[in-house]
Amino acid sequence: MRDFLRQYAPLHFGPSPTILVSSPDAAREIMNNHDISFASRPITTTIDTLTFGGKGILFSPCGEYRRQMRKICFQELLSIRQVQSYRSIREEEIGNLIKYLNSCAPHYQPFNLSKKLASTVNGITMRAIIGSKKLASREIFARTRNCTEYCGRLQFN
């Protein structure tokens, strides 16, 4: 493979230069000594548009900005007090999921587990953010799913 790539062209996955690691030792070397070089996610046109130039915590490049965003996120959104305040919401939504699964079991009724789990996570998120999962829930869920699909697509830009 190395000889082939030297002769014809560097390896790319879409627009991104790509490294092919063919041994555990080489992978260990990369992960232990050069992980910061590979830690940032590529910013595609879709991600750039949806995140205002990669300004969110998920797509910002490694560095001081990302460290500050993570710090704020953990201090304000994911503090023990905040997470505990949503316990009743999580318990209720998980309880609803278990009731649904129990209702399907006696009749051997098939169900889409991925869809039900996504719906449960969406319900928890909507109730935690806006206090109600019914308020525009289907529209927000559909838009979130579309954004996830667009962000995950291979783009050539």
Image (cartoon, rainbow, N blue to C red):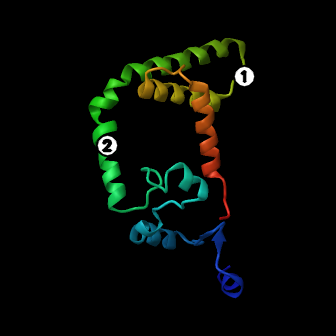
Q: Which mark is residue 110?
A: 1
The N terminus - image quarter: bottom right
Determine which of the numbered discs, if any, sits on residue 119 in the image: none
Residue 100 picture location, percent across and down: 60, 16
User: Looking at the image, is 4 positioned above or below residue 118?
Assistant: below
Q: How far apart are marks 1 and 2 (CA)?
A: 39 Å
In the image, residue 147 sits, relative to residue 120, either above or below, namely below
Q: What residue type is labelled 2?
A: Phe
Q: How crowded is mark 2: few (under 14 residues within 10 Å), some or many (20 or more)?
A: few
Residue 74 numbered tag: 2
Q: Is residue 110 left or right of residue 88?
A: right
Q: Is residue 43 left or right of residue 110?
A: left
Q: Nearer the viewer, mark 1 or mark 2?
A: 2
Dot 1: element? loop
| Residue 70, x across and y down, in percent | 34, 49
Going by the numbered disc 1, the residue's amino acid type is: Pro
The residue depicted at 49 percent of the width and 72 percent of the height is 25
Percent of width and height locating residue 30? 46, 70
- Can residue 22 be seen here? The reply is no
Which of 10 and 125 lies nearest the eye of the viewer?
A: 125
